[in-house]
Every structure is written in structure tokens, then in C-alpha cells.
Amino acid sequence: MDDLTLSSNNFPTNSTDERQALESGLQDILQADYAGNLHAMLASYQRILADNHQREQWPRVHDKLQTLFMCGKAVPLDGPMIGIPVAIRDSDFFRQTASLFGKNRSLLASIETMATAWNATFADTGLWMGKTFEPVSEAVVRDKCDDDPEQVANYDPASSRIGRNFFRQPPDPNALQDIALPVLEQAWKLKDRPMSSTAEGFDGELLAANLEKEKAIPYSKTGGIYLADMGASVVPEMNGKQVYQLNYRWPNLNPVFPMTLLVDELVQVGEGIYLGQLVYATKHYSLGAIDLPFIPGEKDIELGEPYAPHKHSVLESLRSVITGNSETHTPDYGYQNNGYFLMMDPAYAERVYADDAFPQLRPREGESGFETFGRKTAPVASLESDARDWLNGWQDDEILAQKFTTLISEPSTQAGDANVSDMLADDESVLQMLQRISADISAQSKYEDHLKHFDQLHRLFRSGVAPGIDNGLFQGAGKPGYNLRLDGQERHDWYGEPEQTQGFDYYHGATLNLHWGFSETFCPDREASASGASLMPSVLASALSGDAIRGPNVMNMVWHNIGKYIFPWAGKSFEKISPRKLSMLLDESPDLNERYPQRVRELKYHLASAPHYAVVKANRDDYWGKPGRFADYLSSSWDQGMSAEDKTFWTQEAAERWVMGYNLQDKRVVVADALMRIADMNYRIPEPVLQQASEASGSPFVRQGYSFLGVADQTSILPMNNSAEASKRVFQFHYRFPMMGGPVPIGYCLDELVEIADGLFLGQLIYATALDVPFHSAADPDEYKYQLFGYFLLLDDDWERHRQAIKLDTLN
């Protein structure tokens, strides 16, 4: 358990009520959030504040951080510290006006533009990695503060420091992240990391002991200079509370905007843990200094009012002439809290970099500290060097040979289907068979896009065995029935309740063949007309009519020649779903806005989720005139009085039938990170322990999104899979329920899956083609005109290595 340094007595107040309220707030935090690990507690706050999807919780977490800061202890810092931004807040230039209406922040500031932009770009990249506090001479302090009397009088060798910040290149940077550090290096005149105490160009004393401690902190550039010392907080709400103050504003430090506004303040909250608040001036500030070569003089020209709290500015001199008062008047700089950050002693680096704290800061391979604190993974042989083994070597491995040549099947629902095992040639794996079939389909449909060319895949699908759910876990029919079983280590917030990934499993993805499914909707057979195309624009309807509908398979050709190189789909993942979450995501009640206001707001403002929000409105307006499939168990939401009987139902459903699922993306998606965060409300970076688990396969994923609900033991919605005598049982991926969200066109998707070999699954890509009909689970599926748009594969690690070796739907 951490040694806390928190006490309401650390805050100056003469009000007993204020003291009691502060103590009560502190105790509430410790009882509700603190479980003996302060790093983990603060990390949970940081994750909420770094997630734009959880902005409804930001004010509550900001209040907790303010309470912790008020109760923190003022102490000087010495040496290097690991750092992470916890929250960024906009300056509120209209706060006084807002206060007249009883508000703490103005409407404009409440948008939190800076926080939203930061979260979408740099929040968890480790771009900023901390600070160091180095001994400084009185002469240097005098020079940097231009002999400011208060700063000089406050000088104490034991506590006065000069400091600099640490910066680091983000991992797998997108275009914006890639240029961030070079831009900062030029704009802020950053220097290379000093490697010895004799390094030149630093105003502080580079102690060998401090440089040794810095080895635990991965950074490459340093700068952003400040003077640090004990002092009274400049934020009015702090009542003059003692803090350790970091002032960037002195002109002789050569600050660059926005450092010309910045004063950091720090307090100790636990052993080796310091909570800082970012403080910006909103009045009397400079935008920086520029050197105009055509104006003589040694000093640069200040754009605005240079920082000089105890000297007469031009305006102050004018005021003294007018008033006759020559006393120095300290300007009101309008200081405001603009967020929080942490400083953490590298002596506790193991705690800092732990999976339940800040693993995103952990040193990466090739960086300082990696050997001690980096996450070492077993070296993975490149697929190219190992290609011979996975191309044909499996035939000499008895276990792999059995796995790769044995089909998992059940009697087809179509009596006329031949035995699928007859498709498999001698010395051919099931995957090689699929590669051969896929090539034949591409050749046959090249000039005529017709589903008859997909007949072999249809037969395989109708004979495949649907995977199931076992105790909330995705379970295949083979042995052991899963690719991976792993629990996450980080806790995430799901609309007010913490959750942790459990039973994580994932499969790699590949596309076999695609088909223009609209052709079956608007021209079901070769002789039919396209009269149903009235739903489409006239030009497009004309293009889809008659022979044009059965023209070349453009979708398939575009995918194999262009699409697969652009779209970074890498597979799907499955994990347990809580009954609370399941009941929300399957809810189709007319009052969804009242039940789940935050989720509905997110749907509304993510324009790419328009189909889902349209369904919310359709349910509100009682479009179908009948309740949803699960209405009997949703008389109330889970958090608003759901009965014990209904909660038992959802608990059983979560254990026996449903899983939470995500589509996986590989590293190509990183360049579009900012766009994907805007488009997909469910887009996220998997926690490190999950990403690292995929590294050994040679085909790792880096992002999750396009979420779905997986459900077992369903009747296929495609007539081709059923017959009068039998219905095909499948595993379905539901994207369409209104509370799911997700970018167009995923809101029209409902995929189906069967297993055809141990760890190898064949999926049908299915979309609704009646685009104007809102989804409702109780409606007849025929209302949506579901059509087949192609086939895909999900593969475990063994099959994935084999796929890469035989080059099935690969990038080379």
C-alpha cells in the first residue's frame, strides 16, 4: 500500500464547513477508488479523461483531481521524474459571465476543444515523458528572472531548481504524430538528451546521479526550461496554498507560446507521486518574441506584454503618471487551471510501467530503460524465412497434417449437396483447397458476377458447424476450440461502472471472394427486370438493370487488386460481455434517450452512426407498432430498477449465447487514427497485453473497432442456407441493434459464421439492401432483403502462418 501524503489540513481555510467538505470529498475518493495502489487509481482517472467517449464523466473526475491537489503536500522535487498528462482543459475567457448564471464554466469552454483534440492525437503516445529538476546557482536564477526581487529572495540551494522537459517519438506514428517531435524541436529549440555530466548548453548542474536515474525514462529530446521553487499557488481557488511552482514565463528563459502563459504547480500525493496542475494566464501575456533584422538592438521584439510581475510595464508606467501612485502593481494575470499531470519518481518505475498503471509509457525496444522495464517478447521468426515449413512442412508434422486436412462438417441442409470432403485433393490442405476455389470463382465471375459461381463455398458453408458459447466464451467445435484465452489487466469505464476484458480470443482474417449483393435484390434472376430499383437513383437503377447487373465482378476485382492493400482489416476478437452491457446493447425501447442519455448523445453526434441513431428515432416513434425481441426483459434498464428476474435472464444470456466482438485492424490504420476516432465511436487501442499476445503470430493487430454482438445457435437469414426440411444453424455477428453504433455501412451488416476445420471458420458477408427500412429485431428478416456480398475466413495462429506462406489474400 502506498504511503499517502493527503490531508485536508494541507489546504488553507478558516471555514470549518469548507474543511469538513474537503475531508469528506477526500474520504469518498479513498473509499470508492483507492485500493492500496495510487498509481492504478490515478491511471484509471487518466484513462477516462483520455477517452472522448467518456466526456460525460470528465467533470466528476476533474473534481476528484482538484480535491486531491488541495489535499496534497507542498514539497520540493529533485532529479528526473516520469510524467504523463492526465487532463487538458481549455482556458475559460468567459468564466466571470458564466458565474453570473451559476455555472463554473462557460458553454464555450465546456466543449473542451483542446482535450478532444489531444485525446484524438497524442494522449497515450508518450510524446511528453516527464521533467527533471537540476541544481541551479543564484547567479543563473538572477539572470533568468532579470533580478526579480521576489524570485531572488526566495532562492534556496536546497529547493531552487532549473528544469527541462522530456520528449519522445510516438510509437507507430501517423502522419501528424510523425512530425510532432521535429516541429517541437525547431519551435521550442529542443536539445538532444544529455548523455554525460559534461554535456554543454545546459544552465543547470548535470549530476551523474540524476543522469543515472534518467536511464529509466525513455526520451530523446529535452527543452522547455523553467525555474522551480516553493511558493503560493497563483490560482485564486487555491487560497494561497503552498505548492512547488514551475515558472516558464520569464523572458530570459526564451519561452515559446504557450509557455509564455504557463506556470505549473506540484504537490505530493503519495510516496514518489506528485500531482501537478497546468496553470495558464488569460491576461497580460506575450505570444512570444521575434527577431526583426531591420530593427536595430540586441533584444527580440515581444508580441504582447512580457512577463515582469514586479516591474512597471509601459501600461503600468502610464497608470502611475495618471494616478500619481508609483508603487509597483502586480498585474492580475487571470490564472486558471488548465488540466493536470503526474510526476512519478523513477525509483518506482516498476509500478509506473505496470499493466494496471501506465504501460503505454513503458520503454520500447531500442530505447533507454528497455532492458530493465521493457516488455520483452519471444523473437518471432519472419514468415518469409519460415515459409517453407508452413508451405509444405506441415505434411511432416502428424498433428498439423491431421488438423490441416480434416474438415469439420455436419449434414447439409440441402439434400442435393455432395459430400464436401470430395472437394479436397490429395496432399492439399483445407486452406489450399479454399485458395484454389477462390481463384476459380475469380476467374469465372470476372465477366459475369453471378452467385452460381460461388456454389462450392455455398456447399462448404451449409455443411459447416456453428461455433457456440461456453460460459460466456467463444467456443469452436475443434480442439481446444479457441485460439487464445486471455484476461486483460486494465480496468475501463463502461458508462459509470468499471469493467475488465475477460476471456479474450481473436482470429486473423482473410477475404476469399466478394459479390455485388444488390443484384439479387433488384434483379433476382437473369430474366427479371429491375423494377425494384425504384429505391435507387435513376442513373444507378439504369446501370443495375438487365445485363448490366450480371456484368463483371467489379467488387471482387477491386478488392484483390486495390482494396486489400488499403483496408487494414486483420480479423475479429471475442470477449465476455457483462449482462448489464448486453441488456443495453440489445435494448430497442422507445425511451432509449431517457435510459441511456450519454450513449444516445454519442450516437447522435457521431455522424457515421446515422443508421443507428435513425433506429433510435424510429423506435421512439413506434415505427413497427410492436415491441422488440427482448422487450419482455427490458421493462426497465439495468441501472434504473430492472427486476431481479430480468437480471437473471440477462446473466444467463451472457453466459450461454452472447459475446462482445470487435473487428481488428493492422498497423496500416494508424495513419488514419484521428479520422477513425471521429468515424467509429467504438474505435479503441487494445491494452498492451492483448496486442502483445498477437505478436507471436507474425500478424499482429493494433486497433479494435466496428464492434458487434456475437450470438450462437441462430437460424440463417439467407434462404440459400435453408430448405423446407432443415434450417441451417449458424453463429451470427449483429451490428444492427441501435445502441451498437459504428460507421456506415456497418449498421446494415449481419454476418454469419461456421467452422469448417479445426480453428478455421468460413463466414458469409451479409448486408441489408432495403436501405430505407429501419432495423427492428421483431420484424421479418425478409423486410430487409438481406443478400450475400461475399465470403471471408477467420483463422487461428497455425492457419494464419500457413495462409501467409501460401499467399492467400496477402499483401505480397
Image: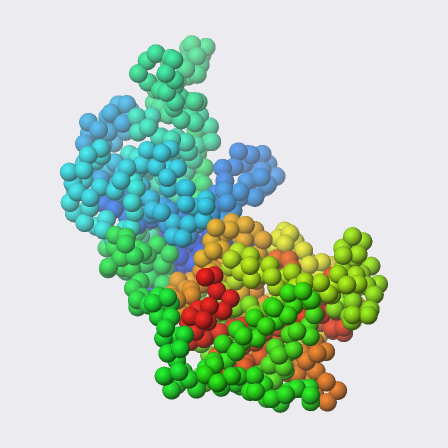
Q: Is residue 492 visible in the rendered structure shown here?
A: no
Q: Quadrant of residue 468?
A: bottom right
- The answer to which of 763 and 343 lies nearer the viewer is 763
Residue 463 in the image: x percent, y percent?
Answer: 61, 85
Residue 254 in the image: x percent, y percent?
Answer: 33, 28
Q: Quadrant of the C terminus?
A: bottom left
| Residue depicted at 58% across the width and 53% down the height | 679
- The answer to which of 292 and 95 lies nearer the viewer is 292
| Residue depicted at 51% across the width and 66% down the height | 809
418 vs 323: above or below: below
The reply, left or right, for residue 553 in relation to residue 62 is right
| Residue depicted at 64% across the width and 52% down the height | 607
Residue 277 in the image: x percent, y percent?
Answer: 39, 43
Q: Is residue 674 visible in the rendered structure shown here?
A: yes
396 vs 547: above or below: below
The reply, left or right, for residue 775 in relation to residue 752 is right
Q: Quadrant of residue 707?
A: bottom right
Q: Quadrant of the N terminus?
A: bottom left
76 vs 690: above or below: above
